[in-house]
Amino acid sequence: MTQPKTVTVIDNATGKQIELPIYQGTHGPDVVDIGKFYKELGYFTYDPGYVSTASCRSNITFIDGDNGTLLYRGYPIDQLAEKSTFVEVAYLQLYGELPTRKQFKDFEYIMRHHSMINESLKGFFDGFYHDAHPMAILVGVVGSLSAFYHDSTDIHNPEHREIAAHRMIAKMPTIAAASYKHSVGEPFVYPRNDLSYCGNLLNMMFSVPSEPYEIDPIAERALDMIFILHVDHEQNASTSTVRLSGSSGANPFACVSSGITALWGPAHGGANEAVLNMLNQIGDVSNIPKYLEKARDKNDPFRLMGFGHRVYKNYDPRARIIRDMCHEVLAKFGDANDPFFELALRLEEIALKEDYFIERKLYPNVDFYSGIIYRALKIPTNMFTVMFAIARTVGWVAQWMEMISDPEQRIGRPRQLYTGAAQRDYVDIKKRK
């Protein structure tokens, strides 16, 4: 990152002026450093939602929303989704480069052999009510890992950070599958070191002791692709939460737990669940015109979920990749008699052809397709965000490791525009009216 130019800011009220450095990244808009804005001029900057604020410098992920580009460590997402695997992408995000054959073999071995969770945690699951939401269980259990692995909690030790990262990525499918088994009252299934990352997850979720379970390669590959697409997405709400928690020096497992909490929100990780709720609300293909009319009405609260994206002002590049996989999964697992899938495909067809959608660039996004795939694979709706969390754990730990090693890292402390009561004196209760 270079510092080739500055911008001059003049305060018309006082006549003061300051020179603020402008930094230029590899891609994306230049960034004005406002670090001395308050010190020199006495003003805070105001940016609700941080829509125009760069909170950090990062080498991990880049998004160009206008052109529909997503890069992991410089590699286009479509190349990784087509040619790579989730475990290889995890290595890339953690270490910055694609692995050699030996590096990949060693990393894959670590992922397999760190997948077990402490046996004491099985009792922890029993403390949750039988119908507890799996995300609630995930938040609690991941946070509790802080109490088990004291050999990897020194955040200033690079080896400790690496071990903690490996453990979180490897154990997340095991914890997620256990949360599902708890919710359906079935016995936990232990991870197997002979299975792939996603194959292991499917086996732990759907196998039972009473009969053999065969992992379908299409289901395995579909999950792997979805996970690749969800690995990281710049400084989104959950990633920013992990960074903010980590800036205080908190335990890494607690930081990831905070990210899971942020992800749980329907505006973030719950978006694919919201897609299915919308489709259930529409109910039938014959109702599509009525609901499209509602969507066009600005005064109507109904919204088309799974269409468009806050960052992407073009077609979501992840949606283009996952669309073909969605159709492949539906061809293999979709119930031809299920009107739900016909409804989803009809909505997709309209969105890709109708002027109303095209003009507003309301194309189906990754949440639209991932929800349909999960449903076809018999993954229950309350597990959708859990699946998201499994994949995003890679991005969280990569961003956390980068933040801890950044020499500019400081505890996060946003400022505010205070609009409350002015200073006033306490009035005795007997004198209040």
Image (cartoon, rainbow, N blue to C red):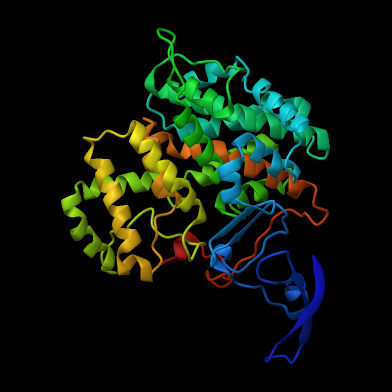
Q: Position of residue 27 (x, y in %)?
A: 68, 65
Residue at image location 75% in from the left, 44% down from the top: 97
The quadrant the N terminus occupies is: bottom right
Residue at x-position 80% and y-position 52%: 406
Q: Residue furthest left?
A: 286
Is 21 above or below relative to 397?
A: below
Decide if residue 336 is on the left or right side of residue 172. Answer: left
Residue that sits furthest to the top in the current view: 210
Work out whether 337 lies above or below 402.
above
Image label count: 0
Indicate whether 15 appears above or below 153: below
> Is residue 395 found left or right of 407 in the rendered image?
left
Image position, residue 420 (x, y; %):
52, 69
One can see residue 340 in this view: yes
Q: Is residue 121 above or below residue 60?
A: above
Location of residue 394 by image quarter: top right
**Residue 245 shown left or right of residue 212 in the figure:** right
Query: Observer-nearest residue: 427 or 25?
Result: 25
Q: What residue appears at the point 75 percent right and 48 percent down from the top-left corner?
A: 402
Image location (x, y in percent) of residue 367 = 43, 48
| Position of residue 256 in the picture relative to residue 348 (left or right) | right
Q: Quadrant of the C terminus?
A: bottom left
Q: Where residue 245 appears, x then y in whole percent?
A: 66, 46
Q: Identify the residue at image location x=52%, y=32%.
A: 138
Q: Quadrant of residue 112?
A: top right
- Is residue 303 in sight in this rendering? no
